[in-house]
Image (tube, rainbow, N blue to C red):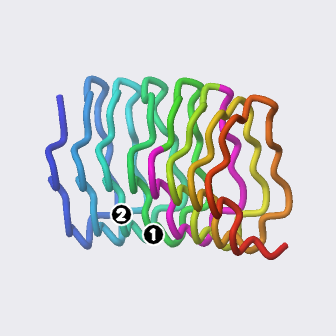
C-alpha cells in the first residue's frame, strides 16, 4: 500500500506512471530526479506524500493532489521547472517549507479555505507567480513569497495573525 523511500529516484527515462486505488503513502524522495516524468495519476486513497517526493521532475506540468491528502510536504515540488498547474483539494490544512520552491512556470495558485498555515520559502523563487488567493490562512512564515517578481495580486484574509520576516522580499511588482 505504499511506494517506498526513493523507490523511483533517478529513473531519468520514466515518463508516465499510474497507481491503482488502495495506495496510501508515497515515501520521501520517491520520484526525485525523474526528469522526464510528465504524467502521474495519484489515486484519492493516498493520505501522505513524503518530503521531496517530486524534486527535479522537470517535465511535470500539471498534477492533481488526492482528495484525502491533508498536507503538502516539505520540498514536494522543489525546482519542478515546468509545473504550471497544481490542483489542491479542500482537505489540505498545511503547506510545509519549500513546497513549491523555484517553480518558475507556476503563474497562479488558489489555496482552499482549509489551508491555515504555510511554512518558510513555500513559493520562494516562483518568478512568474502573479496571483495568489489566500482564504483562511493564519500564518505566513519567513520568505514565503520571496523573489516572486511578478506577484501583482494577493488577497490577505482577516484571519492572518502572523506574517514572518521577508515574506514578500524581492516582489518587485
Q: Tell me what residue is drawn at x 21 percent, y 67 percent.
A: 11
The picture quadrant where one finds residue 13 is bottom left
Residue 55 is labelled as 2
Residue 6 is labelled as none
Dot 1: element = loop
**Where are the magenta residues, as a range?**
96-113
Local packing at callout 1 (Cα closer than 10 Å; few below 14, some 14-19, many 20+) is many
Q: Is residue 172 above or below residue 2?
A: below
Is the N terminus in the top left, top right, bottom left or bottom right quadrant?
top left
Locate residue 87 relative to residue 96 in the image: left or right: right
Q: Tell me what residue is drawn at x 43 percent, y 23 percent.
A: 68
Dot 2: element = loop
The residues bearing labels 2 and 1 have C-alpha atoms spaced at a distance of 6 Å
Residue nearest the observer in this picture, 41 or 129: 129
Labelled pair 2, 1 in contact (Cβ < 8 Å): yes
Q: Tell me what residue is drawn at x 73 percent, y 40 percent.
A: 134
Locate residue 103 relative to residue 48 in the image: left or right: right
Give percent across and percent down for residue 79.
45, 69
The picture quadrant where one finds residue 71 is top left
What residue is disc 1 on? 79
Q: Is residue 164 above or below residue 23?
A: below
Disc on the earlier residue, 2 or 1: 2
Is the C terminus in the top left, top right, bottom left or bottom right quadrant?
bottom right
Give percent across and percent down for residue 108.
72, 55
Q: Tell me what residue is drawn at x 52 percent, y 30 percent.
A: 92
Amino acid at each position: 500500500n505504499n511506494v517506498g523511500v526513493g523507490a523511483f529516484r533517478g529513473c531519468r527515462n520514466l515518463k508516465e506512471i499510474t497507481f491503482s486505488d488502495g495506495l496510501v503513502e508515497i515515501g520521501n524522495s520517491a520520484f526525485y530526479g525523474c526528469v522526464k516524468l510528465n504524467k502521474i495519476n495519484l489515486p484519492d486513497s493516498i493520505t501522505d506524500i513524503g518530503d521531496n517526493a517530486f524534486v527535479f521532475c522537470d517535465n511535470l506540468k500539471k498534477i492533481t493532489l488526492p482528495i484525502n491528502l491533508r498536507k503538502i510536504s516539505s520540498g514536494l515540488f522543489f525546482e519542478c521547472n515546468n509545473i504550471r498547474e497544481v490542483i489542491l483539494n479542500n482537505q489540505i490544512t498545511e503547506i510545509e517549507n519549500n513546497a513549491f520552491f523555484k517553480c518558475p512556470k507556476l503563474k497562479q495558485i488558489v489555496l482552499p479555505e482549509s489551508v491555515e498555515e504555510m511554512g518558510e520559502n513555500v513559493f520562494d523563487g516562483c518568478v512568474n507567480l502573479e496571483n495568489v488567493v489566500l482564504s483562511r490562512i493564519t500564518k505566513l512564515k519567513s520568505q514565503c513569497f520571496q523573489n516572486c517578481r511578478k506577484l501583482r495580486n494577493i488577497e490577505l484574509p482577516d484571519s492572518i495573525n502572523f506574517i514572518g520576516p521577508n515574506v514578500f522580499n524581492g516582489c518587485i511588482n
